[in-house]
């Protein structure tokens, strides 16, 4: 898809000296309870990798959820996110973000967006951070029932908060919105991580995804409650 190729080209152009920075990542594997357009129990998987060098940070995240009821697939969603961030000064940064979602049980066959803008560190302390982002972009999507394609400009907004509660407990949350003329997409998650070892933690998360304009008979909101093992590397 053209929008993905464009984002990958931007990622290559904005990268600095290869392998000169710091790599880190984490993976989740766990049980998932889904409600909304499907009622089921399933397995959830997510892998995130981040590379930081000088003032740049590049993050790629891949996720998948699948479920079946009586040997029939009842939920299947795949997501991919890529983000590049450049620290302009100690508080201000620029960013570019690609989001792709293929949810076989939502009102859309796919949603792909590419956006960029500015972010600000409202709080940047050792034990907690609060970031606010705003920008403009473009989104391409296809309705599931009618196969109608929607291509539109979007306004992006995001707020993210992280806090280390104790040496072994961390809280993370974010709220993302992509506002367009035809459809607005909202996504939010709250998560709690409790470390069991230096690399392994128990994670409990609640994720909600909402589209304002969907086909008749399709739920606007899908909710995911997940209990998983989180591995840091």
Image (cartoon, rainbow, N blue to C red):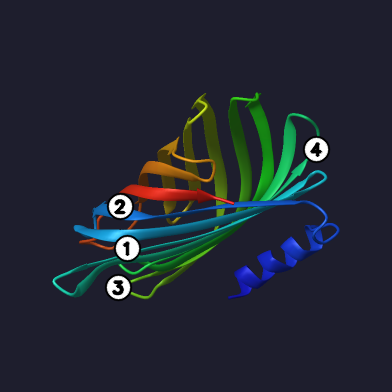
What is the distance, in whole Å, between disc 1 and disc 4 at their CAs? 38 Å
Q: Is residue 219 left or right of residue 54?
A: left
Residue nearer the viewer, 148 or 232: 232
Image point (40%, 42%), residue name: 202
For label 1, the crowd category at 10 Å Cα-Cα, with few meaning under 14, some 14 to 19 and many 20 or more, is many
Q: Is residue 63 left or right of residue 60?
A: left
What is the distance, in whole Å, between disc 2 and disc 3 at their CAs? 18 Å
Disc 4 on helix, strand or loop? loop
**Front label number (3 vs 4):** 4
Q: Are marks 2 and 1 in contact (CB under 8 Å)?
A: yes
- List x then y, in percent, for residue 187: 43, 46
- List x then y, in percent, for residue 149: 45, 71
Q: Is residue 218 left or right of residue 186?
A: left
The residue under label 3 is: 145
Image point (77%, 65%), residue name: 12
What is the distance, in whole Å, between disc 3 and disc 1 at their CAs? 10 Å
């Amino acid at each position: 898809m053209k929008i993905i190729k464009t984002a990958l080209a931007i990622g290559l152009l904005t990268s600095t000296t290869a392998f000169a920075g710091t790599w880190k990542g984490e993976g989740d594997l766990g049980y998932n309870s889904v409600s909304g357009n499907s009622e089921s129990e399933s397995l959830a998987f997510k892998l995130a990798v981040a590379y930081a060098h000088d003032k740049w940070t590049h993050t790629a995240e891949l996720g998948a959820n699948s479920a079946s009821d009586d040997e029939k697939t009842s939920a299947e969603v795949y997501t991919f996110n890529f983000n590049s961030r450049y620290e302009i000064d100690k508080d201000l940064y620029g960013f570019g973000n690609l989001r792709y979602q293929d949810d076989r049980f939502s009102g859309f066959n796919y949603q792909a967006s590419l956006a960029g803008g500015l972010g600000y560190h409202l709080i940047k302390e050792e034990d907690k951070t609060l970031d606010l982002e705003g920008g403009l972009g473009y989104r391409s999507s296809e309705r599931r029932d009618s196969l109608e394609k929607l291509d539109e400009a979007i306004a992006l907004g995001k707020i993210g908060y992280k806090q280390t509660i104790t040496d072994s407990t961390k809280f993370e949350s974010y709220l993302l919105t992509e506002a367009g003329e035809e459809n607005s997409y909202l996504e939010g998650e709250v998560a709690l991580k409790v470390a069991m070892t230096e690399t392994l933690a128990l994670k409990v998360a609640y994720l909600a995804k909402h589209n304002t304009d969907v086909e008749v008979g399709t739920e606007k909101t899908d909710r995911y409650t997940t209990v998983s093992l989180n591995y840091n590397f």
